[in-house]
Image (cartoon, coloured by chain):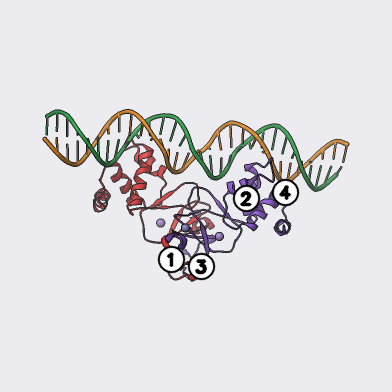
Chain colours: A purple, B red, C green, D orange
Amino acid sequence: MVTLKAARALLDEKGLRSSATRIHVLAYLLSYPSHPTADEIYQALLPKMLTLSKTTIYNTLDLLTEANITRQITIDGKEARFDIIIVDHGHFQCNTCKHIYDFSVDLDECMVADLTGFKVAQRNIYFKGICPNCQK
Amino acid sequence: MVTLKAARALLDEKGLRSSATRIHVLAYLLSYPSHPTADEIYQALLPKMLTLSKTTIYNTLDLLTEANITRQITIDGKEARFDIIIVDHGHFQCNTCKHIYDFSVDLDECMVADLTGFKVAQRNIYFKGICPNCQK
DNA sequence: ACATTAAATTGTAATGGTTACAAAAATAAA
DNA sequence: TTTATTTTTGTAACCATTACAATTTAATGT
Ligand SMILES: [Mn+2]
Ligand SMILES: [Mn+2]
Ligand SMILES: [Zn+2]
Ligand SMILES: [Zn+2]
């Protein structure tokens, strides 16, 4: 598994201890960059780590987000999702199949003067509608 | 209260029955377009309507959103907020004072080709950071 | 006015994602 | 090995939201 090594390297790079849980959570996000929820990650790792606790999943995801390795995204307000891609990009969630698509967007292009004086730390953009698959 | 009449007119216009609860919820949103939560509206109206139920607040806000009178916005993933301004605009939430600022944005300007074939029904954009007030 | 039907509101209980917290386990330092 | 620190675990609490049945209110028809 190449992602395990990559996960370990990412953690080392950020000065975080590479515990088994952290490696596997991060490796999962690298392997499945599909904006999983905490529970999806938990369910996926449970067969491999029988004593895994969901609290640890939350702790780990908080740690990764704090270290700027992952990004927490809020789309439906129901459950948080986590993105291994941290560069600014847009999300499109299909109202039918609920799948979340990435799309690139140039946020500098559409900015207006209203935010002079504001210190912007994070930019989020998400659309909703029907994806091509679900339209026909 | 001019907003009571305005609220009634808005409901009539959309073919919704203008019950007391609906009028007051809508009038509150018109008077305080500060993206209140359901509970904030509930607490504000309670002194006027002693038997008010929070379920009714949720029902009413759902109704208004469904009728395209208000718009539900999700920023922190913790609690939903409601906006009386339904034209596309951006939101900036200050990490310190938690206040939510509106800002205008030209979303058509920054669009890319990635979403051809997608039927976009709703567009959301929100930033986070520190507002001018809280910077010094 | 009265009966009948439909719509709106209420109260309570359940849901579900997330967090708090203290105990247990694992790891690092001495 | 001891000691200290970090990580993980399990459970309970939290809290916004929803489900649902009962009650109240309003509209309709006679
Ligand atoms: Mn993404
Ligand atoms: Mn707004
Ligand atoms: Zn779809
Ligand atoms: Zn502020």
Where is residue A104 drawn, in percent x and y?
Answer: 53, 67
Number of other residues with Cα within 10 Å of mark 2, as a class: few under 14, some 14 to 19, many 20 or more: many
Q: Do discs 4 and 2 share a chain?
A: yes
Residue at 57% in and 52% down: A36
Number of other residues with Cα within 10 Å of mark 4, as a class: few under 14, some 14 to 19, many 20 or more: few
According to the image, label 4 marks what residue?
A20
Where is residue A70 drawn, in percent x and y?
Answer: 62, 56
According to the image, label 2 marks what residue?
A61
**Amino acid under disc 2:** Leu
According to the image, label 3 marks what residue?
A105
Q: Do discs 4 and 3 share a chain?
A: yes
Asked whether the beta carbons under mark 1 and mark 2 sit within 8 Å of each other, the answer is no
Q: Residue furthest front?
A: A136
**Amino acid under disc 3:** Val
Q: Quadrant of residue B38?
A: top left
Number of other residues with Cα within 10 Å of mark 1, as a class: few under 14, some 14 to 19, many 20 or more: many
Tell us which disc is closer to us: 4 or 2.
4
SS at mark 1?
A: loop
Labels 4 and 3: the sequence-earlier one: 4
**Amino acid under disc 4:** Ala
Labels 2 and 3: the sequence-earlier one: 2
Residue at 54% in and 64% down: A89
- Chain identity of mark 1: B
Asked whether the beta carbons under mark 4 and mark 2 sit within 8 Å of each other, the answer is no
